[in-house]
Image (cartoon, grey):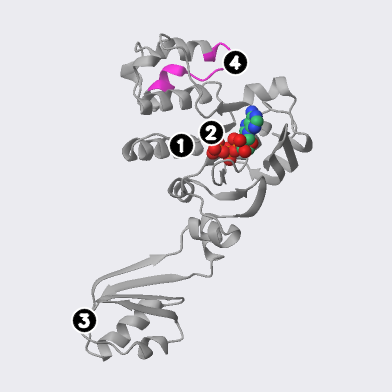
Amino acid sequence: MKVIEVSNLRKRYRDQLAVDDVSFTVEEGEIFGVLGPNGAGKTTTVECVAGLRVPDSGTVSVLGGLHRTELKERLGVQLQSSTLPEKLKVWEALDLYASFYREPANWVELLERVGLADKRDTPYGKLSGGQQQRLSIALALVGGPRVAILDELTTGLDPQARRDTWDLIERVREDGVTILLVTHFMEEAERLCDRLALIDSGRVVAMDSPSGLIARVGGQQTVRFRLSGPLDNSRLKALPEVTEVSRSGEQVTVTGTGNLLLAITTVLSAAGAVPTDLRMEQATLDDAFLSLTGKKISA
Ligand SMILES: Nc1ncnc2c1ncn2[C@@H]1O[C@H](COP(=O)(O)OP(=O)(O)OP(=O)(O)O)[C@@H](O)[C@H]1O
């Protein structure tokens, strides 16, 4: 079942075209990511999906086109850099947000789940960045939504807090919540998303699973190693798997496709050469974005 359907969305702010032509659908139970560089139009897109902005043209349908008042009960939204009053205590924020819904979730349980049970009486202003972020996720979930929209979920968090947040989101998905996630972190997108829309300058440039997008780069791999003795490059270059060989001092870099590592090590061992510091790098989502747009997602 399609939970979110976006067709030919377009939104302009005065002289700035933020979303040019965006279409995608999200299936029930999916974590669908919107990935792209700063200013690509990600936030504007999901704000239109959440009903917080009115598109200039195009259509948005969530949960079969529910009317705004009904949709509010089924949709949880965590927006980028939303803040709460400094003195509002954690439990007061949850209690307040729960009062907006006809059938709210049990916020005491939710507090346990996001790891803030011991911060119940702490004012918002006294929470760490990671704790504030987790509270904002709890607030997005307090209505017991079927769809959650999360914008820049882990921006500003340290690596451990980021991984904890990813675990939390995976548990939310296990409960059957469909998630629309905005991110510019490749690792987050690869780890969490079933499918992704890559967005650049207000347009979808590609849509697929993370591995499907990476495969579009052509499965290019790079193998690097150090070699102290001489090596006849032409032997490596003659391999069908190899596209390029370069050497700088002891450092050798070979790019290619297929079973590149096996092909290289076979040639090296036949030549009696012993590589050290051998590493293999595979294409990433950043490479996929670069090959599609000529730009890098991460600055
Ligand atoms: N309220 C606004 N008024 C005017 N221009 C805006 C407004 N909000 C966003 N924009 C502009 O629209 C474009 C798209 O912004 P948007 O926030 O949707 O992108 P984004 O991909 O979410 O970027 P970021 O990751 O930096 O938030 C940008 O050029 C931005 O400067």
User: What is the CA distance from the residue labelled 1 to the residue labelled 3?
Assistant: 45 Å
Where ligand 1 lies, by image quadrant? top right
Please report contact status of discs 1 and 4: CB closer than 8 Å, yes or no: no
> Secondary structure under badge 4?
loop
User: Badge 2: how crowded within 10 Å, few (<14), some, or many (20+)?
Assistant: many
> Secondary structure under badge 3?
loop
Which residue lies under the disc numbered 1? 169
Disc nearest the viewer among 2 and 1 = 2
Q: Is the residue marked 3 within 8 Å of ligand 1, measured from its CB?
A: no
Disc nearest the viewer among 3 and 4 = 3
Residue flagged by tag 1: what amino acid is it? Ile
User: Badge 3: how crowded within 10 Å, few (<14), some, or many (20+)?
Assistant: few
**Residue at x 61% of width, y 48% of height:** 199
Which residue lies under the disc numbered 3? 274
> Secondary structure under badge 1?
helix
> Secondary structure under badge 2?
strand
**Residue at x 46% of width, y 18% of height:** 107
Q: Earlier in the sequence, mark 1 or mark 3?
A: 1
User: What is the CA distance from the residue labelled 2 to the residue labelled 1?
Assistant: 10 Å
Query: Per the image, is 160 magenta?
Result: no
Q: Earlier in the sequence, mark 3 or mark 4?
A: 4
User: What is the CA distance from the residue labelled 1 to the residue labelled 4?
Assistant: 22 Å
- Give coordinates of residue 295: x percent, y percent: 55, 55
Which residue lies under the disc numbered 4? 101
Which residues, given as a range, are shown in magenta?
97-111
Tell me the tag on residue 150: 2
Please report contact status of discs 2 and 1: CB closer than 8 Å, yes or no: yes
